[in-house]
């Protein structure tokens, strides 16, 4: 769907079929020149807040916020969904978030299941952000990436 205010397109995807938790991908409005040049954009992995027990990428506050970030920063974004407490105990939010990161990175060769990630992302410019509990997840995922993907530079 396209946001009439920003021109940003978004769609929901199931990252891990075992959990069925949706994430939302955002694509900035593309100019004709960007399309012709096969422009690639930085990628933002965004983790929503909500004290691990509320909100989702589809919550209006997060949808509108990430859409405006994508429009202003001219980036592709994945707003990461994760299972919530109390129905699911921690560390499930971290596990789901790690699964989303692995899924996103599996597209870096251009052969993943999601065309927006294959065609529009510059995998040399990936960063993470979040608010509240999402900031905590973002920090923990960056630390885990630094430990497990030492061939890649992880910047804090």
Image (spheres, helix red, strand yellow):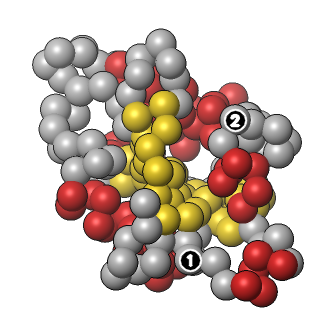
In depth, the one of 66 and 101 nearer the eye is: 66
* Residue at (48% x, 31% y) in the render: 14
* Residue at (82% x, 45% y) in the render: 110
The crowding category of the residue bearing disc 1, from other C-alpha atoms within 10 Å (few below 14, some 14 to 19, many at least 20), is some
* Residue at (14% x, 19% y) in the render: 86
Camera sees residue 98: no
* Residue at (82% x, 38% y) in the render: 111
On screen, residue 82 versus residue 27, left or right, reads: left
Where residue 116 appears, x then y in whole percent?
66, 54
Measured along the vertical axis of the image, is residue 149 above or below residue 96?
below
SS state under label 2: loop
The picture quadrant where one finds residue 85 is: top left
The picture quadrant where one finds residue 145 is: top right
Where residue 114 appears, x then y in whole percent?
66, 42
In depth, the one of 135 and 38 nearer the eye is: 38
Camera sees residue 21: yes
Where residue 91 appears, x then y in whole percent?
34, 19
Q: Quadrant of the N terminus?
A: bottom left
In depth, the one of 150 and 109 nearer the eye is: 109
Q: What is the count of numbered marks?
A: 2
On screen, residue 99 versus residue 59, left or right, reads: right
Tell me the tag on residue 18.
Answer: none
The crowding category of the residue bearing disc 2, from other C-alpha atoms within 10 Å (few below 14, some 14 to 19, many at least 20), is few
What's the CA distance linking mark 2 and mark 1?
21 Å
Are the residues tagged 2 and 1 within 8 Å (C-beta)? no
Q: Quadrant of the C terminus?
A: bottom right
SS state under label 1: loop
Earlier in the chain: of badge 2 and badge 1, it is 1
Measured along the vertical axis of the image, is residue 130 above or below residue 2?
above
Residue marked by disc 2: 113
Residue marked by disc 1: 29
Where residue 46 appears, x then y in whole percent?
43, 53
């Amino acid at each position: 769907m396209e946001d009439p205010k920003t021109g940003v397109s978004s769609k929901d995807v199931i990252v891990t079929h075992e959990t069925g938790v949706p994430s939302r991908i955002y694509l900035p409005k593309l100019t004709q020149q960007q399309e012709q040049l096969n422009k690639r954009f930085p990628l933002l992995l965004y983790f929503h807040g909500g004290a691990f027990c509320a909100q989702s990428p589809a919550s209006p506050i997060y949808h509108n916020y990430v859409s405006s970030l994508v429009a202003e920063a001219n980036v592709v974004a994945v707003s990461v969904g994760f299972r919530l407490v109390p129905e699911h105990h921690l560390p499930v939010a971290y596990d789901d978030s790690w699964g989303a990161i692995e899924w996103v990175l599996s597209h870096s060769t251009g052969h993943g299941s999601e065309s927006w990630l294959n065609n529009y992302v510059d995998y040399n410019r990936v960063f993470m952000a979040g608010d509240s509990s999402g900031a905590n997840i973002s920090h923990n995922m960056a630390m885990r990436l630094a430990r497990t993907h030492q061939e890649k530079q992880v910047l804090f």
